[in-house]
Image (cartoon, rainbow, N blue to C red):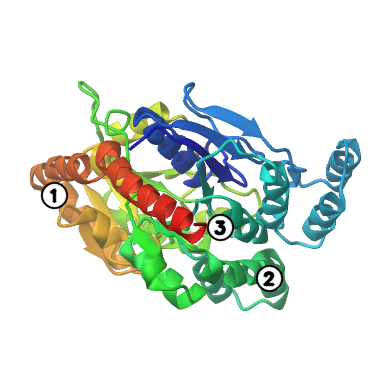
């Protein structure tokens, strides 16, 4: 394939929060290594990119950097050359909405309006109105990691309180836009078969427009560390506290059960915890204050060190479009317990102990089983790393991307003949 000029769009690309920042960093570098000129056009917070990849900052208001009204008001009035869309973003956030995908789509569409620079545009899950306009002018691919409607449904199931449900309705109001936009996108890439089925059922997209390509992992960054001793009683998980989709409650409840037989057992949680949130209250209720440690804003190296010091990894998610913590733990040769749902069994194959979602007893029993026969599960974990290296390496995955890119270019050029 000839060298292409590729723009990857990302409405927000937090370095440490969630998988989108990781995805943008990895896919941009992988395409760069294949010989393409890649630029990332991102709203704040901005990604941590490899030095070979250029970052174009497209400032929004970045209102979620703070939760104080005065600070947000200052952000609005300090921005130069404000438009009506900036005021829309401010008032939408003020009333509990999440307007960033929509306003980023408007800004980047304007930015690209007179550009002839790029051969291909790839958007990372904004699924916004601006993308429909952009795909008229450029070969275009939308990345949909999974339909966020699923997050919304799980959050509604987690509480019957009217105030909470109203707040969730306001926050997820951007889904109306995504449901309208997604069926009009000509080419979609998603990282799992499970996500593809979700996109078809939730967004009513044509299955012929959707290609499944797994996300990749740098297995040198996530690898066993020689001469690093594992703490027998250390468990590890990745979960944003108070996000029901991640199923952290069930890991905590399992920890309470395990504490009776293993007083030294403790759980490292890679993620943040809210001061007065549901998770902190649950930890206090279960008397686990000394058994749960939260670690946030970690580099990949620091995460790798935590895996290296842990005896068992747990992924208790109720849904995963593509579970980075699954393949990260497996790449680090940590015996894994994971829920048998959505994309997870696609990723693990036979190299993890799969359990039912929302089942604290199965989590606790699985931990006991692994601790009592650790050499057996350590061998499974070693084979699991080989599975990750073979199936989730970026060379293999980028070649699959190039096939879809070539098809997208051909379809666009034929449509414009």
Q: Is residue 319 left or right of residue 231?
A: right
| In the rendered image, the vertical position of residue 238 relative to residue 28, given as above or below | below
Residue positioned most to the right:
77
- In the image, residue 204 lies at what x, y percent? 49, 77
Label 2–label 3 contact, CB within 8 A = no
Mark 1 lies on a secondary structure that is helix
* Identity of the residue drawn at 41% across and 66% down: 209
State the CA–CA distance, disc 1 to disc 3. 32 Å
The residue labelled by disc 1 is 372
Mark 2 or mark 1: which is in front?
A: 2
The residue labelled by disc 3 is 242
Residue 135, visible in the rendered structure: yes
- In the image, residue 8 lies at what x, y percent? 53, 42
Q: Nearer the viewer, residue 155 or 72?
A: 72
Give neighbour class at mark 3: few <14, some 14-19, many 20+ (Cα, 10 Å). Answer: some
State the CA–CA distance, disc 2 to disc 1. 43 Å
- In the image, residue 107 lies at what x, y percent? 72, 47
Q: Specify the quadrant of the image occupied by residue 91.
A: bottom right
* Mark 1 / mark 3, whichever is N-terminal: 3
Mark 1 or mark 3: which is in front?
A: 3
Q: Nearer the viewer, residue 273 or 106?
A: 106
Residue 318, visible in the rendered structure: no
The residue labelled by disc 2 is 164
Label 2–label 1 contact, CB within 8 A = no
The N terminus: image quadrant: top left
């Amino acid at each position: 394939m000839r060298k292409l000029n590729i723009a990857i769009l990302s409405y927000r690309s937090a370095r440490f929060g969630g998988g989108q920042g990781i995805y943008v960093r990895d896919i941009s570098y992988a395409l760069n290594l294949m010989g393409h000129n890649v630029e990332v056009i991102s709203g704040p917070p901005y990604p941590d990119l490899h030095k070979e990849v250029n970052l174009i900052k497209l400032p929004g208001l970045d209102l979620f950097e703070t939760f104080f009204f005065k600070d947000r008001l200052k952000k609005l009035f300090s921005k130069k050359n404000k438009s009506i869309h900036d005021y829309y973003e401010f008032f939408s956030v003020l009333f509990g909405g999440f307007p960033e995908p929509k306003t980023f789509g408007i800004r980047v569409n304007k930015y690209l309006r007179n550009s002839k620079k790029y051969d291909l545009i790839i958007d990372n899950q904004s699924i916004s109105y601006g993308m429909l306009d952009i795909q008229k002018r450029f070969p275009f691919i939308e990345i949909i990691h999974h339909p966020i409607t699923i997050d919304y449904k799980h959050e509604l199931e987690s509480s019957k309180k009217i105030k909470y449900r109203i707040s969730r309705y306001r926050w997820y109001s951007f889904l109306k836009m995504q449901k309208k936009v997604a069926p009009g996108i000509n080419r979609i890439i998603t990282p799992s078969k499970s996500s593809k089925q979700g996109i078809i059922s939730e967004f009513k997209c044509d299955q012929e427009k959707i290609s499944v390509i797994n996300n990749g992992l740098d297995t040198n960054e996530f690898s066993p560390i020689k001469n690093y001793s594992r703490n027998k009683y250390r468990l590890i998980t990745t979960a944003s506290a108070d996000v029901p989709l991640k199923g952290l409650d069930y890991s905590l409840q399992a920890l309470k059960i395990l504490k009776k037989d293993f007083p030294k057992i403790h759980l490292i949680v890679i993620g943040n915890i809210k001061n007065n949130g549901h998770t902190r209250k649950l930890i206090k209720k279960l008397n686990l204050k000394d058994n749960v440690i939260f670690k946030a804003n970690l580099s990949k190296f620091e995460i790798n060190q935590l895996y290296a010091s842990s005896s068992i990894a747990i992924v208790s998610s109720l849904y995963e479009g593509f579970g980075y913590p699954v393949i990260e733990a497996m790449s680090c040769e940590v015996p894994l317990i994971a829920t048998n749902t959505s994309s997870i069994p696609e990723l693990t194959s036979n190299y993890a102990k799969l359990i039912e979602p929302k089942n604290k007893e199965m989590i606790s029993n699985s931990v006991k089983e692994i601790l009592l026969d650790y050499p057996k599960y350590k061998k499974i974990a070693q084979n699991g790393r080989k599975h990750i290296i073979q199936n989730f390496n970026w060379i293999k995955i980028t070649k699959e991307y190039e096939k879809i890119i070539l098809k997208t270019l051909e379809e666009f050029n034929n449509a414009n003949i």
